[in-house]
């Protein structure tokens, strides 16, 4: 997400995003990360982890560690098959906005 009304926060967001891009690039260059992994995939992973953190809270405060381990291992090379199409940028932005405001969609399933 961007924060055009909060310059300091926007600068931190942009810096973090550039850091993500460098980490992704280094992981691909080292042969450890699938070539089809894109920066938007990291956004999806962060959103998933945020929901796990919210859901597990004090009841299972370390549950996120297992999810992150699964994520890391699933994106390592060699790729085990092609990925589904990535979400459109506008749809992903809307999903990020909903997560940020705690308004997840009640719809489930895949849209084709």
Image (spheres, helix red, strand yellow):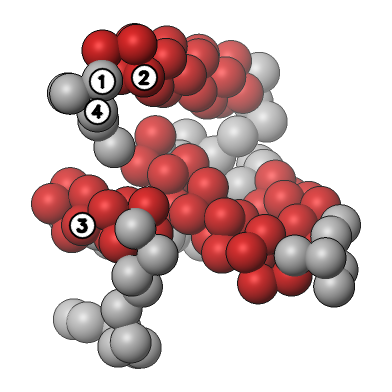
**In this figure, which residue is indicated by the disc labeled 4?**
3
User: What quarter of the picture does the N terminus occupy?
Assistant: top left
* Tag 1 secondary structure: loop
Horizontally, residue 56 falls left or right of residue 46, namely right
Disc 3 residue crowd, few under 14, some 14–19, many 20+, Cα 10 Å? few
**In this figure, which residue is indicated by the disc labeled 1?**
6
> Mark 1 or 4, which is nearer the eye?
1
Q: Position of residue 13 (x, y in %)?
A: 39, 21
Q: Position of residue 3 (x, y in %)?
A: 24, 28
Instruction: For the residues labelled 1 and 4, say whether their Cβ atoms are less than 8 Å apart.
Output: yes
* Tag 4 secondary structure: loop
Q: Position of residue 66 (x, y in %)?
A: 82, 59
Horizontally, residue 35 falls left or right of residue 57, namely left
* Tag 2 secondary structure: helix
Q: How far apart in space, not on screen, are marks 4 and 3 (Cα)?
A: 14 Å
Mark on residue 9?
2
Tally of numbered discs: 4
């Amino acid at each position: 997400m961007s924060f055009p009304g909060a310059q300091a926060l926007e600068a931190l967001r942009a810096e973090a995003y550039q850091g993500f891009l460098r980490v992704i690039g280094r992981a691909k260059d080292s042969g450890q990360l699938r070539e089809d992994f894109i920066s938007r995939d990291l956004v999806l992973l962060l959103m998933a982890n945020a929901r796990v953190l919210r859901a597990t809270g004090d009841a299972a405060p370390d549950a996120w560690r297992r999810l992150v381990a699964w994520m890391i291992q699933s994106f390592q090379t060699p790729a085990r098959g092609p990925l589904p199409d990535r979400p459109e940028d506008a749809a992903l932005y809307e999903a990020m906005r909903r997560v940020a405001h705690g308004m997840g969609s009640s719809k489930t399933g895949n849209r084709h």
